[in-house]
Image (tube, rainbow, N blue to C red):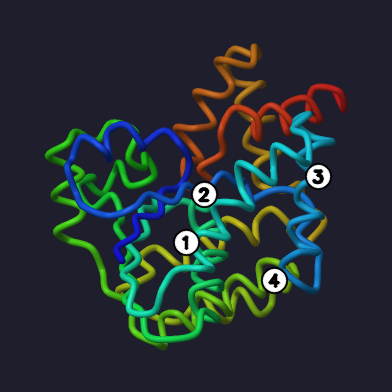
Amino acid sequence: MVYHILNGDALTDRFKATGLSGQMIVTRECLVEGDLSGDTLPEFFKTRARYLSAAYQATEEEYATAVVAEMNRLLSSPENSEFNLWFGYDLFCRANLWFILSLLHDLPGIKEVNVVYPAHLKKQEVWQDFGGATLENLLFCFEHRINLKEEDLTLGKELWTAFKENDLEKLEKLSSKSSPAFPYLREVCQAHLDRFPKSGEEPRPERTIKEIIRSSDSDFPSVFRAFSEKEGIYGFGDSQVKRIYDKVVQAG
């Protein structure tokens, strides 16, 4: 069985238009924010459902249908399946990717795992994900997918565990590992570490938003556009940036 795991629904229609064979599984999570506690997968899913219900008014029933059911399809896949993971380079995508890799790492039996990155992007555009990708771009990216070895799956699980447990020291050490399967790993991990500075400084996203407000328009749409240009490495959507923006504005 061939599976294509997409990071969110935005790519689904264009992916279908490529004509690539296989079943779609959609990852509808934003693991870059919120509570990640839970010693078992069911406990973790309950934690996430509660967080997203409080933060975004999504019911726990909706979470079960939109998220858990998709992950259960992955977990119940037959042996010798092929998994193609369509994820961007940024932190938002990486957190979700590491989670998926941790599940695949623990999945029993033989499997083939590939990551399909937005390889069509120029270096100055790497944080733009698949947003502007044409069908030809998507097929190019698929042709240039990266096959993961067992040690890559292990590294993916280790990255997820460090991220989930907020073990910043461990994450920093892991970021120094070099693998074609994890391009821009050091930069992305550093961006996450900068959310929790040790020296008493403000977190990097908050600091950037303050700088934007001081130097240009302070309305949220303008700030969001500027933040996305300056800090595209985070991959934050408007919901994530709005939460930080509101906190900065309220603090004066």
In the rendered view of the protein, which quadrant contains the N terminus? bottom left
Amino acid of disc 4: Leu
In the displayed structure image, the side of residue 76 where residue 33 appears, left or right: right
Numbered disc 4: secondary structure:
helix
Q: Earlier in the sequence, mark 1 or mark 4?
A: 4
Q: Earlier in the sequence, mark 4 or mark 2?
A: 2
Q: Earlier in the sequence, mark 3 or mark 4?
A: 3
Q: CA distance from mark 4 to mark 2?
A: 25 Å
Above or below, 82 relative to 80: above
**Pointer 1 residue:** 187
In the rendered view of the protein, which quadrant contains the C terminus? top right
Residue 27 image label: 2
| Mark 3 Cα-neighbour bin, 10 Å: few <14, some 14–19, many ≥20 | some
Q: State the residue at coordinates (65%, 62%).
A: 193
Residue 5 image label: none
Above or below, 56 relative to 181: above
**Toward the viewer: 207 or 128?**
128
Amino acid of disc 1: Glu
Q: Earlier in the sequence, mark 1 or mark 2?
A: 2
Q: CA distance from mark 1 to mark 2?
A: 23 Å
**Pointer 4 residue:** 168
Q: State the residue at coordinates (34%, 84%).
A: 149
> Closer to the camera: disc 4 or disc 2?
2
